[in-house]
Amino acid sequence: MASEGAPTGFRTGLRGLTTRGRSFLAAGITAVLCSYLLGQGALLQVGVLLAALPLLAAALVLRTRYQVAGGRRLAPHRAPAGQEARVHLRVDNISRVPTGLLMLEDKVPYVLGPRPRFVLDRVEPRGYREVSYRVRSDLRGRYPLGPLQLRLTDPFGMCELTRSFSAADTLTVVPLVQPLPPVKLAGAWAGYGDSHSRAVALAGDDDAVPREYRHGDDLRRVHWKSTAKYGELMVRREEQPLKSRATVLLDTREIGHRGAGPASSFEWAVGCAASVGHHLLERGYQTRLLTDNGTQVPPVVTGANSSVSESIGLLLDELAVVQHSSGGGLNRAEEVLRHGGEGLLVAVVGTLDDEQVAGLGRLRRSAGAAVAFVLDTASWSSLRQPAPAGPDEGLQRQLRLLREAGWTVLAARAGDSVPDLWRMADVHAQAAATAPDSKGTAGR
């Protein structure tokens, strides 16, 4: 809840006089001058009354504006692109006098729609009014809402002041997330920990799974029975469950994408990364987002101070504002992955050259599983020109090289569905796709 600022003087009230108020003031001053020239005492009283009304109205409005407070609430704060969000406004009259007619106007960016305007009837003392409006954007990003502007008028319509509240909010338009089917990826389980939680949790003290002593181990973990059996110092394994890790690599290079606006290959790639990241986080993966320039959003560990929803929100907030990069390669991302690329690697890439394909092939060695969405950006090139019937020979060769390096390759074209492509990453679907045909050749 935000209230309006300090007064700026009675001149502000005079500048806020409406046409009616100025007319009354001019008529009053004229009547006073005429009474002085003509010597009419009754005309003087009329003139004083006419001039006093707009001045009293201005004083009333100036006093009322200190006692008006406003607030804004967004539902939700994160809205998927193309879907609506509702903005709720509340105006409280915390004074002891009614406000008269109020006119509200909230400031919103043009991409969210026209500026909403509302006319509120007289608000009783200690009362409030609530209104709401809807916003929608097909373009992801962060959009400021506010400040809220309020026009205060007196009951006679002689004075009108426009003031802005200080509070503002931000609506985050995130990429549209598509639910993905659960699939089984070859080698997808990779993480850390001494043992699998299910194996250790079922073992008692006598059945504890031991390992050899390492420098720095707590001596209280020494398992004396196993030490006597093996003839060397043994300790109990930490009951630390394996945790799946995943990295979503997003290619943001401007030269690697085609098209413009929501129908571009870049926006398709951002939406794909959002859907995959959301899916992996929900399935328990500690997921980080990595871009071609080396920028990464580290995973948020689920625990007492965080949750899966917070991790998803962090990922979507980053994807809401990601923009094209001016880089020409994936070298920085490759360097990050070489120093910590274990686990599942999902890459969403645009147009690649042979050197970049070779680099992705090398990264496959350190990943538990690797899935690549390779965009055929020629199909996004232009809506005026018909798209090619299929990937060109160069792209086909690159896809073959990635498959030979161990990647699960999913070729994406304009209009393709992310859930349908993700379903093809299943090990059973891959086995069926690569099974020998009737002629004995492997299918592609």
Image: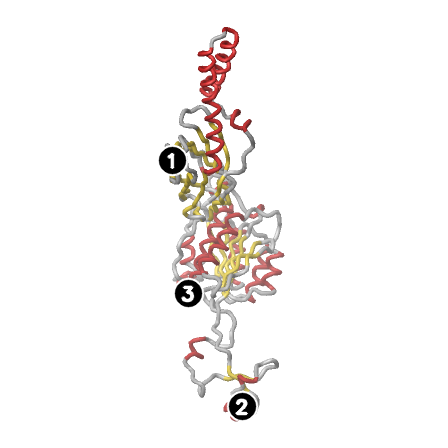
The reply, left or right, for residue 210 in relation to residue 417 is right
Q: Quadrant of residue 338?
A: bottom right
Q: Nearer the viewer, mark 3 or mark 2?
A: 2
Residue type marked 3? Lys
Spatial CA distance of label 1 from label 3 is: 61 Å
Q: Residue at x 38, y 59 (%)?
A: 181
Indicate which disc, 3 or 2, sits on the residue closer to the N terminus: 3
- Is there any visible trace of residue 87 in the rendered image? yes
For the residues bearing labels 3 and 2, Cβ distance under 8 angstroms: no
Q: Residue 149, how many percent across, how many down?
A: 48, 35
Determine which residue is flagged by label 3.
184
Vertical relation: 135 (above or below) 357: above
Q: Quadrant of residue 335?
A: bottom right
Residue type marked 2? Thr
Question: Residue 152 has which mark?
Answer: none
Indicate which disc, 1 or 3, sits on the residue closer to the N terminus: 1
Determine which residue is flagged by label 2.
227
For the residues bearing labels 1 and 2, Cβ distance under 8 angstroms: no
User: How packed is label 3: few (under 14 Cα within 10 Å), some, or many (20 or more)?
Assistant: few
